[in-house]
Image (spheres, rainbow, N blue to C red):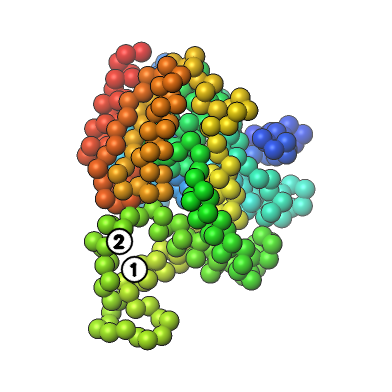
Amino acid sequence: MDKSGRKYFTFAEPPGQIILENGSLLGPVTIAYETYGQLAADKSNVILIEHAFSGDSHVACHAEDEDEASRPGWWDNMVGPEKGIDTNIYFVVCANILGGCMGTTGPTSLNPATGKPYGLDFPVVTIADMVHVQKKLLDFLGIKQVLSVIGGSVGGMQVLQWCVSYPEMVRSAVPLATTMRHSALAIAFNEVARQAIMADPHWNGGDYYGKAMPEMGLAVARMIAHITYLSDESMRRKFGRNLQDKSDFSFNFDVDFQVESYLRYQGSKFVRRFDANSFLYITKAADYFDLEASDGTSINTLNDSQTRFLVVSFTSDWLYPTYQSKELVKALKKNGLDVSFCEIEADCGHDAFLLPNCRLDSLIAGFLKGVAEND
């Protein structure tokens, strides 16, 4: 375990490689993960949390006496003692996804065949591959079933994939602000972001490790993505047409508006913590995800599942709007599953599931309590 509370599990050492959905072989595979709370003697209190696109295993802080471990997590308002996901009650596991850059094997990892970072030699992975790797982690931890799998956005896709790939392991599922498949609009935004990275002269076909990084391309990609996480109302309320540290237009291409400054800041901050190739791989995996497929991996295979679902959408989420959550609910109910649905009024866009919200806290807390008590 490192100073941040992160632990590591490595498996599939050659020749025991895993087979990915596209038929490629990969190994060894290392998973970075963190745990919170105490595992019950019968292991009945496990909650697996799936992070969104740019998240990591650090879902919440661990302790106040360790600098890195005590830094805020990406869902600190939800996970912790006496919070919506109460770590006094539940044992929480959160792992960085396959293809990421926060400790789990991805394009930044060393390719054992060359001794250099994979770059674009890393195989294209899918949401199903990510879940398959997480299953290996739970096997390693001796966990045969989880009380709930919870996640939003791309994390919500992983929640749904868990229910399809390993329905016997999932007692309940909470997909938040997510979809069964990307719309053309979502794919389009991802493609523009990918093109921004690949157009950067320093991208060099993905072979930039140890050299100049494609910082400008990645920053622009983040700016594009960040716009999709917000809403018109939240941006109007926060920025409007306010100018940045000036009383009139500059009449050049420097920053004039506060929203321009904000986006540039988000882009430059992202570059310091994320890898451009991981951005390409994860967005592609999200675009490929489709639980309306007819290849035996769809939501329609769940007609014998005992999994209980809580599906949540947000009124101002235009990236994965409520109609997509309703399509999911309809598909689940068509298969005779136990489904609860709630659309939460929120004006802050797709990111609403990450922000403090008393209604979401109480919904999740109540749902988990009901699942635990009724089993």
349 sits left or right of 306 in the view: left
User: In this rendering, is residue 368 above or below 314?
Assistant: above
User: In this rendering, is residue 183 above or below 231?
Assistant: above
Looking at the rendered structure, the secondary structure element under dot 1 is: helix
User: Mark number for residue 233?
Assistant: none
* Labels 2 and 1 touching (C-beta < 8 A): yes
101 sits left or right of 261 in the view: right
Q: Residue at x 35, y 28 (%)?
A: 310
Number of other residues with Cα within 10 Å of mark 2, as a class: few under 14, some 14 to 19, many 20 or more = some
Q: Position of residue 49 (x, y in %)?
A: 42, 35
User: In this rendering, is residue 150 above or below 116?
Assistant: above
Number of other residues with Cα within 10 Å of mark 1, as a class: few under 14, some 14 to 19, many 20 or more = some
Q: Residue at x 61, y 67 (%)?
A: 199
338 sits left or right of 18 in the view: left
Q: Which residue is mark 1?
A: 259
Looking at the rendered structure, the secondary structure element under dot 2 is: helix
In the image, what residue type sits under mark 1? Val
In the image, what residue type sits under mark 2? Met
- Which one is in front, 103 or 332? 332
- Which one is in front, 248 or 282? 248
Q: Position of residue 79 (x, y in %)?
A: 33, 38
Q: Position of residue 15 (x, y in %)?
A: 77, 34
Q: Quadrant of residue 150?
A: top left
Q: Which residue is mark 2?
A: 235
